[in-house]
Image (spheres, coloured by chain):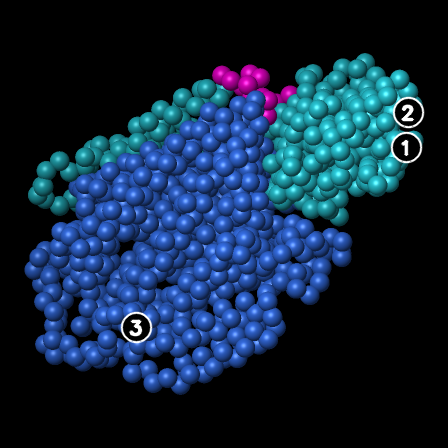
Chain colours: A blue, B cyan
Amino acid sequence: MTSVAVPAPHVAAAAHAKTGLWSWITTVDHKRIGILYFVTAFIFFLAGGIEATMMRIQLAAPNATFVDARTFNALFTMHGTTMVFLALMPLSAAFFNFVVPLQLGARDVAFPRLNAFSYWVFLLGGLFLNSSWLFKAAPDTGWFGYANLTSKTFSPGHAVDFWMLGLQILGIASLAAAFNFIVTILNLRAPGMTFMRMPIFCWMTLVTSFLIILAFPVITVALVLLMFDRFTGTSFFVPAGGGDPVLWQHLFWIFGHPEVYILILPAMGIVSEVLPTFSRKPLFGYPFVVYSGLFIGILGFGVWSHHMFSVGLGPIADSVFAITTMLIAIPTGVKIFNWIATLWGGHIRPTTAFHFAVGFIAMFILGGLSGIEHASPPADLQQTDTYFVVAHFHYVLFGGTILGIFAGIYYWFPKVTGRLLSEGLGKIHFWLTMLGFNLTFFPMHLLGLWGMPRRIYTYDKGLGFDTLNLVCTIGAFVLVISTLVFIVNMLKSIRGGKPSGPDPWDARTIEWSIPSPPPEYNFAEIPTIEHRDDLWERKRSGKGPYPQPANAHVHMPNPSYWPLVTAIGILLFFIGLMLSIYLAIFGFVFTAFGIYRWAFEPAG
Amino acid sequence: MPSLPHPFRRLSFWGCLGLALLLAGCHAFPQNTLDPSTDFGWQTHKLFTDILWWEVGIFVLVEGALVLALLRFTRKRKGAGEPEQVHGNTGIEVAWTLAPALILVFIGVPTVMTIFRTQAPPPKDSLKIEVIGHQWWWEFRYPEYGIVTANEVHVQRGRPVHFEMTSADIIHSFWIPRLGGKRDVIPTRTNHLWMTPEKLGVIPGQCAEFCGTSHANMRLHAVVNTPVDFAAWVRAEQDTLPPPKDDSLAVQGAALFVNPAKLCTTCHTINGVSNGVVGPNLTHVGSRRYIAAGLLANTPDNLAKWISNPPGVKPGALMPVVGVTPDEARALAAYLTSRK
């Protein structure tokens, strides 16, 4: 295996500044952008976690007064919005950025400057949204922003403006990134890497990216209509003017349900990489895992009204959406069965990454099963908008997505840094996470069934909610501790971790054939792919390492600050929409200027 | 260390499930969805438990397979050769695609049947009650009897009740868990929910759709009466009470109530006294168990507290601080308490 380790080839890469703040601001290197995504999203993840912890303190006892009603409403709105748009999606994007080009055998993404632009727009959008706290105008109408509570009549002030404009900014970032990754995956695969030889993580990135470009325009339309309602007095969602608040729900969930798969599919991709590596077996039923991912993505657009079973859409609509929703259980089940079959007969090495991947399966099963209850509208009439639903989607998005992302972090950290995370601290992190997670979220199933609605800042004594709410809060603090353990692990390992070498896991895919951390150009010579798990096959075929050129000229794109300039223009435009039309016009012109200079910039 | 899912998780699943079933029916959980008290509630509950048993079975099988795989195939020592590189098996794939599809038939068919049964038109002899959601209280109108009341809805055991629902402002959701499922209350739309109450008692519920600042404080109660008690309640509600005479505090309160400076009549109706429609009808407010949409027990002290500073009791409450002295608040409370 070590024979595959690659000596740094003699390569003439363009001489760019390699260190310092300016090199990060102007970087177009997908690996650096991936790291920026990770650090930023992780900080937002901590912010969302602090918001969650504050809610849990408030709910630890009946009639508590830790925060007031408006603050609590802002906390759950910002917790949801932050976790979905500023933590989980960009954490996935961090993996897309760092891993996908390496798995494809590419030197970078298709549009490196557009990639930098996506990151800057995401960062500025996230800061804009969170700056609302400073102006005491944090959004407080829920991450779903149901009309007509969001209308000017019922939500005066700028809280809803921050939310609706912030999401539009973030949508631009997501769309630009999704197009980038679609083009990258379609066009920059190494020679010989057919679609059915492509690593599963790349497949899931591709499906996710298509979901983004199909789903985000829908919410963008909805947000623009809301913007007209609020800024110019139209009545798309205002009943008093003949509008329909239920229209918002349809538009939101036509986006919102695919969004759930946008959040979970990347984690499924990660798990599908981690399990084979540590079982030392190929992924069982690779084509079926791919097809079920595609099927989930397509079906995901036909189930939105299962979020609306209490709206009263009538028995026919309820039945149709119940059945389409139940159908999703089939491809999801197929994935789970294939993962278990991957373990079966393998030589399992229970590393921390593997622990988290198995934790993902174990918890996701529970989240999927409680989802079947919601798929049945009569049963859902009792469960919707209760803590049962809160339990369900945290088993999917925390038990699923976050555990999957942790698996990915422990798995690819050595590729990013050249050092291994501590396995000892990792196992502590894993078990504390499992304990805290189940302590926090399992009791919520029962609270919901016992009649505790979501989004209430307080509850009375005598409803039987007291004890389990306290248990949930204790669980939340265990999660706080587990997260601290993880942070300590990262900070310790980044400098003092065990050097990993290029291929610490005896892995299967080609990103492990290059040094850790990879050179700026990734592959001195693009490998030719002959098998699905090409590196694994190669290591066992006796062919030796991939050929390295003695003297190659690798042409890398120049750094650029125009993506950041353009992103700032977009931010100014949206702030202007809220504050002053002149600022909006200035922002528009600034953006146009940025794009113009970007377009005519010598690419190096 | 082999990677087993946390053992306590499965224990807690069974433990809590058993606990939940044991406690179903226990009064410790007055909003318990597992303790239905109507035919509608039983239908949704049956569907829930049927699906739950399928899920328990699947859970045991799949998590069991996962645990078994981990126990059997976790490598105890290094360097024991390579496992066989199995890529898949189409027969197995087809089998585990069809198996869940088959189970879904057993879940889907009863689901669709229950949907159509529970959403059928209500029986002709139903007690129709119009429900109107407001930020943050509930208005109930009985067109059959000409009654308008708030936050406490009286129904009759054994007689189907048909809630016809809409909203005066934004979307709320009408939910009294033990009566059955919830239904959203949406401006410009009319929604329906009907069921036949089977058990007597006072059953709490609360708004289930986030509706702004005091969403958590938008509570309500259903009172399930015997036919005799229900008829008595209807007669009492239809009665227009005479102004208070004996109790001097209440007489003083009656005068304050109609004093334009105190604004009461702008928003509130007391039959024969005022016609405000913004806030709850107070004709028989003294007979209700709670005030402020289920927040406070209906006592003169609580009424006085509420009248003095509504947003202090219920954050964001649309009833303003009208500027009454403590004495005036006590007088108004005495007057309202007399409106049985």
Q: Is residue B291 visible?
A: no
Q: Which chain's residue wears label 2?
A: B
Query: Label 1 amino acid?
Result: Val
Q: Mainly helix, strand or loop, the magenta region?
A: loop
Magenta stretch in the rendered image = B22-41
Q: Residues within 10 Å of mark 2 (few under 14, many from 20)?
A: some
Q: Residue at x 9, y 63 (%)?
A: A544
Q: Nearer the viewer, residue A336 or A49?
A: A49
Q: Secondary structure at mark 1?
A: loop
Query: Label 3 amino acid?
Result: Trp
Q: Residue at x 11, y 61 (%)?
A: A4
Q: Quadrant of residue A254?
A: bottom right
Q: Secondary structure at mark 3?
A: helix
Q: Is residue A351 left or right of residue A475?
A: left
> Dot 2 corresponds to which residue?
B243
Q: Which chain's residue wears label 1?
A: B
Residues at marks 2 and 3 touching, judged by CB atoms closer than 8 Å? no
Residue A281: image location, x then y, percent: 21, 47
Q: Residue at x 40, y 45 (%)?
A: A49
Res B273 label: 1
Residue B220, magenta (yes or no) = no
> Dot 3 corresponds to which residue?
A22
